[in-house]
Image (cartoon, rainbow, N blue to C red):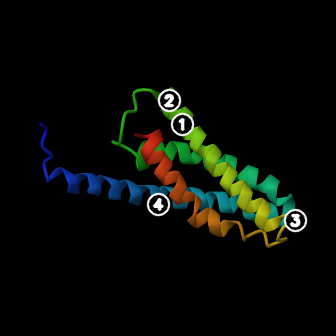
Amino acid sequence: MKTVNQGQQPQRASDMLGQLVRFAITGGFVTMLYAIVYWPLATYVIHPMAAFVAGYLVALTTGYVLHSRWSFRGHGSRDDIRRTTGRFFAVSLVSFALNGMFTWVLTGPLLHGATWWPLIPIFFFTPLVTFALNRLWVFA
C-alpha cells in the first residue's frame, strides 16, 4: 500500500497558490487589455457585441501565450501541444460564451445598460471559471 508523505500536501497547495497568483496577474493583465480594446470601441465606435468580439480576439491570443508559458508553467504535460491548444481554445469558447452573454444581457435589449457594465462580471466571475478549467483540464 502506498503511503502519502504529509510533506507533499503543502507543496501541492503551494504550487496551486503560485499558479493562482500567476493566473491572477496574467488574467488581470489580459482582462485589462480586453477592457482597453472593448470599452472605447463599444462606447464610441461600434455596437457593444462587435466590440466584445474585437476585444476578445486580442485577449485570447495574448492569454494563450502568457498562460501556457507562465501561469501554468511546470504544471502537467506540455508534450502534446495540439491537445493543450485545443483544450485551451475550448475553455476560451466557454469564456467567450459567458462574456458574450454578460455583454448582451447588460447592454442589449434586456437592460440597455452602460457599455462598462459587462466589465464587472468579466473581471470577477469569468476568471474563476477559466482558472478552474485551465488547471483541471487544459494544463492538467
Q: Left or right: where does residue 59 sit relative to residue 72?
A: right
Density class for disc 4 (Cα within 10 Å; few <14, some 14-19, many ≥20) is some
> Which callout, 3 or 2, points at the residue further toward the start of the chain?
2
Disc 2 residue type?
Arg
Residues marked 2 and 4 touching at CB (< 8 Å):
no
Q: Residue at x 27, y 57 (%)?
A: 14
Which quarter of the picture shows residue 111? Answer: bottom right
Q: Which mark is residue 83?
A: 2
Q: Secondary structure at mark 4?
A: helix
Does the residue at mark 1 contact the one at mark 2 (Cβ under 8 Å)?
Answer: yes
Q: Earlier in the sequence, mark 1 or mark 4?
A: 4
Q: Could you tell me which quadrant the N terminus lies in?
A: top left
For the residue labelled by badge 1, is the local secondary structure a helix, a strand or a loop?
helix
Check disc 1 and report the residue beneath it. Answer: 87
> In this figure, which residue is indicated by the disc labeled 3?
109
Amino acid type of disc 1?
A: Arg
Separation (CA) of disc 3 from disc 1: 33 Å
Which mark is drawn over residue 24? 4
